[in-house]
Amino acid sequence: QKEVEQNSGPLSVPEGAIASLNCTYSDRGSQSFFWYRQYSGKSPELIMSIYSNGDKEDGRFTAQLNKASQYVSLLIRDSQPSDSATYLCAVILTGTASKLTFGTGTRLQVTL
Amino acid sequence: NAGVTQTPKFQVLKTGQSMTLQCAQDMNHNSMYWYRQDPGMGLRLIYYSASEGTTDKGEVPNGYNVSRLNKREFSLRLESAAPSQTSVYFCASSLGTPGWETQYFGPGTRLLVL
């Protein structure tokens, strides 16, 4: 079992719809969770971080964390073509000296 | 501010050749990292430096060495390149404790080893 798992996609959603991206992790003791966006040929950039159970909203983005079920998700409301990218989930696993472990990413395509 | 810069942007090596990837940040960050990204494997940590003068191994350190030259610069050296080291290499930095602070990534170095 991979430590941080994501569906590779592509996830295709029409413009204006809600995109839902999911990530599961193996370490029940994990405390810190991050979503990065990576455009093709570019470097990752941080979208959101979340540390507590529940929802965290920032503009069109909402991160949701459920530690009991060991998943973290990212919702993108009113999806735009410019949101088309690969979204990387990253987790700090216990015993890793606060180093990030990344999932393989989900490719999102927002269609016109 | 340039943020995190990396040189070169692209490099082709022959098996057995050596090279050093350079990384510099102008954000006065304490922590710096080297990752490699391969299709289907995601980003994997090679080495990191929590502060000037310290370095530590990540998930995939074999075949690499690093030097934290000063607070700004963190270099990655391949002593004898192998085709398995063909990858995209990203340098990143963060202000404080690794993981609790946002990591800012450089533009990447695309390395092809023939």
Image (cartoon, helix red, strand yellow):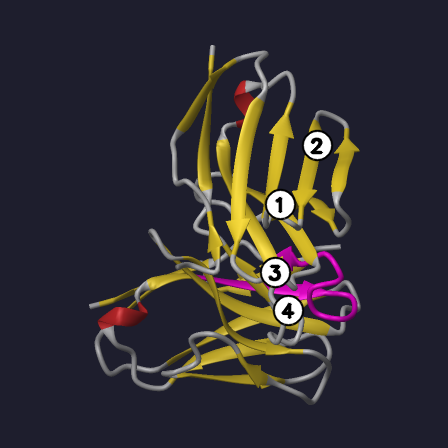
The answer to whether marks 4 and 1 mark residues whose Cβ atoms lie closer than 8 Å is no
Host chain of mark 4: B
Q: Which residue is mark 4?
A: B24
Secondary structure at badge 3 equals: loop
- Residue reaching furthest to the bottom: B53
Residue B11, above or below A84:
below
Compared across the picture, whether B16 is left or right of A91 comes to left
Front: mark 4 or 1: 1
Q: Identify the residue shown where x is 69% and y is 78%.
A: B50
> Which disc, if any, is residue B107?
none
Please tell me which of labels 3 and 1 falls first in the chain.
3
Query: Magenta residues, as a range?
Result: B89-105
Quarter containing the C terminus of chain B? bottom left
Q: Which residue is mark 3?
A: A28
Host chain of mark 3: A
Please tell me which of labels 2 and 3 falls first in the chain.
3
The answer to whether marks 1 and 2 mark residues whose Cβ atoms lie closer than 8 Å is no
Q: Visible in this render: residue B17?
A: yes
Compared across the picture, whether B72 is left or right of B112 comes to right
Compared across the picture, whether A58 is left or right of A10 comes to right
Secondary structure at badge 4 equals: strand
Q: Which residue is mark 1?
A: A35
